Amino acid sequence: MSNNTITYDDIKSSDQFRNNKVDAMSQFVNINEFKIEAQKKLPKMAYDYYASGANDQITLADNENSFKRIKLIPRCLVDVSNVNIKTSIFGVDIKTPIMIAPAAMQKMASHLGELDTLAAAHEMGTIMTLSSLSTSSVEELSEQSKGNPGWFQLYVFKDRKISEDLVKRAERLGYTAIVLTVDTPYLGKRDADYKNKFHLPLNLQLKIFSHLPLSKLDGGLNNYMATMIDPALTWKDVQWLKSITKLPVLVKGIMCPEDAELSIKHGADGIIVSNHGARQLDTCPSTIDVLYPISKAVRGRVPVILDGGVRRGSDVLKALALGANTVMIGRPILWGLSVGGQAGVSRVIKLLNDELLLAMAFTGLNSVKEISPAIIYKHPLSKF
Ligand SMILES: Cc1cc2nc3c(=O)[nH]c(=O)nc-3n(C[C@H](O)[C@H](O)[C@H](O)COP(=O)(O)O)c2cc1C
Ligand SMILES: CC(C)CC(=O)C(=O)O
């Protein structure tokens, strides 16, 4: 078993090792405890990169705090002996509405990085989106998952040929959707990364591009993005992307009803309400605060996914009540990965699933289909 060729079978054959890890992790009972433990384990440069938001991190705090301000109405004497959280997206059944957001460079968190995350996604019956800027290749994930690696996130490079090849490669390898990130014409300013002079550890590379000079981050992250990523991307490029792939295309980074409408007009098959984990435009609103008007404007024409600040199962319930079909989580996955590799990621998802089940029982709901805005408390004096 060499570093580059660890397979699912290898991972499974180490059950004993994994079970011990799961036991060791049962001491962490919520996402914040995983975060605290991850900070102890990770080098400062990696932790800061994962944790940071842009500038003064106002939106970073808001993404979580806005969830806390939304209140749920308990309902009584409903038979909730059989609550279940199964759902589906693009006709594919998933065991939980909690999906895994694309996050770059996961091998800073665990030896197997993205491969651990994918193994956990399979174990928990959910879908992972692989970042364009990953430390594992599209091929590796496809191989380990026997051709079922999940979704692929696309950054569009100035050299369109690179992006086109990447999309075709992902399609050929069994990825089932393309997530086009549209909120990153340039990379946001994350102060800690400047101070730490963030760089990839020397043993790692951006694996997807290992055949190109693009695999190193030599001039730093912001410089890399400014050199490689196309800031001239416009709505017509959604149509371009649709024209080069048969896969569903989701537009990630939508924060207002107008852009949701434009996404649909230009052929998007799904929308991800996201402010990039508050890493781009600081002082933009939290995602949960903009979700309801967006989902109302979309009117069920395409699936709506929300990410940003989801840290409790009750946050998932609130997002679904305000019109999301599913949510994605970013940093909680990185904390789980840092603390316990695959087992850590699975435990993070399980914690959130269990909290979601409980919150649904307390609000008198038995299935995802039953979730509606009716469970959201409206203060008598508020206009909301
Ligand atoms: C360390 C890190 C790396 C990320 N890398 C990417 C990426 O490569 N592509 C992308 O579209 N979004 C990326 N994101 C944004 C996430 O997909 C997601 O929008 C965000 O993390 C959700 O917020 P949360 O972390 O509060 O759950 C990244 C986020 C973090 C924290
Ligand atoms: C390598 C980065 C551009 C990945 C990213 O999207 C982020 O750090 O937010």
Image (spheres, rainbow, N blue to C red):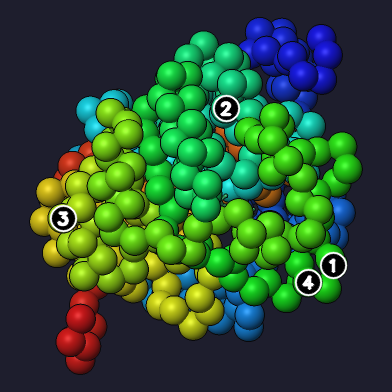
Cβ atoms under marks 1 and 4 closer than 8 Å: yes
Mark 2 vs mark 1, CA separation in Å? 29 Å
Q: Earlier in the sequence, mark 3 or mark 2?
A: 2
Q: Quadrant of residue 88?
A: top left
Separation of marks 3 and 4 at Cα, in angstroms? 39 Å
The nearer-to-camera label among 2 and 1 is 2
Q: Are marks 2 and 4 in contact (CB under 8 Å)?
A: no
The answer, for residue 88, to whether it is visible in the render is no
Q: How many other residues sit within 10 Å of disc 3, few (<14), some (14-19) or many (≥20)?
A: few
Q: Identify the residue under disc 2.
A: 138
Spatial CA span between label 1 and label 3: 42 Å
Determine whether the residue tagged by mark 4 lies in a helix, strand or loop. helix
Choose the circle earlier in sequence order: 1 or 3: 1
- The one nearer the camera, 28 or 257, is 257
| Residue at the spot 78% in from the left edge and 72% down from the top edge | 194
- Residue marked by disc 4: 194
**Quadrant of image for the N terminus:** top right
**Left or right: where does residue 80 sit relative to residue 132?**
left
- Quick check: marks 3 and 4 in contact, CB under 8 Å? no
In x, y percent, where is residue 36? 74, 58
**Image quarter for residue 66?**
bottom left
Q: Write the residue at 80% across / 38% down.
A: 204
Q: CA distance from mark 2 to mark 4?
A: 29 Å
Q: Foreground: 159 or 33?
A: 159
Amino acid type of the residue that numbered disc 2 sits on in the rendered structure: Val
Report the disc number at residue 196.
Answer: 1
Drawn side of residue 205 relative to residue 310, left or right: right
Residue 247 x/y as whole percent: 31, 31
- Mark 2 lies on a secondary structure that is helix
Label placed on residue 130: none
From the image, state whether disc 3 or disc 4 is nearer to you: 3
What's the CA distance linking mark 3 and mark 2? 30 Å
